[in-house]
Each structure stands twice: as C-alpha cells, then as structure tokens.
Image: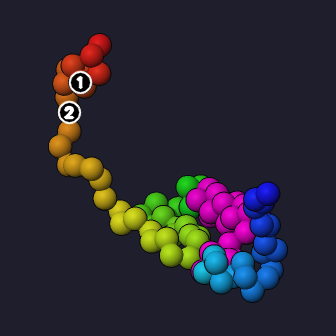
Amino acid sequence: MCGQFVVDPSSAVFRQQSGDMAGWTKEVQLLASIANAVRTLSWQWGGDKDHPPEPILPPGVEQPKRGDRFGDARMTLAETRDWLGW
C-alpha cells in the first residue's frame, strides 16, 4: 500500500524539501495579501500617485518591472473587433 507522507511544516524535513518557501505558509500568504491590499488602498487614496508600493512577495519571486508588456503596439477599435471576430 502506497501512502502519501504528510510532513509537519515545522520539521527539518519540510524545511529541507521546501527551501526558501518553507516559512511561506498559507497564513503568511494571506497576511501578505492583506498587507498588499491595505498598502495599495492607502497609496490610491493618498496623494503620491507616482510611486506605487512594492508588494510583499514570497522568497524567490521577483517583482515584474513597470512597463513590462507583451508588446508596445496598440490596436484600433476596428482592428480589435476584427481580431475578436465581432
């Protein structure tokens, strides 16, 4: 009978297997999400619109650079309708 092992997140085995993500539990992810939302709302309602807050990211995840997009070309409304098949 094969079973799946459940490893305690506070154990050394879990930390070894998970690396930097070991401390990034669901609770920590939720708290980071709440903190990011509060920081974003404070920025939106505040006066400094030029410098948005940097989000709290898990270890090993890089913040995408502002302006990174798939392309820089824009479509006209007619081109968009053709592309969508409307």
Nearest the viewer among 40 and 80 is 80
Residue 77 seen: no
Relative depth, front residue between 45 and 15: 15
Q: Is residue 40 magenta?
A: yes
Q: Residue 74, image x and y in percent?
A: 20, 39
The residue to which callout 2 is attached is 75
- Whether 86 is drawn above or below 50: the answer is above
Contact (CB < 8 A) between labels 2 and 1?
yes
Q: Quadrant of the C terminus?
A: top left
- Give the residue number, with chain letter if any, for mark 1: 83
Task: Name the amino acid type tagged 2.
Answer: Met
Query: Relative to residue 62, is residue 84 drawn left or right?
Result: left
Of all residues shown, which one is farthest toward the top? 86
Look at 63% across and 76% down and name the residue there: 18
Q: Find the distance from the CA under tag 2 to the CA under tag 1.
A: 9 Å
Query: Dot 2: what SS?
Result: loop
Q: Is residue 13 left or right of residue 48?
A: right
**Is disc 1 placed on a helix, strand or loop?**
helix
Extent of the magenta region: 20-41
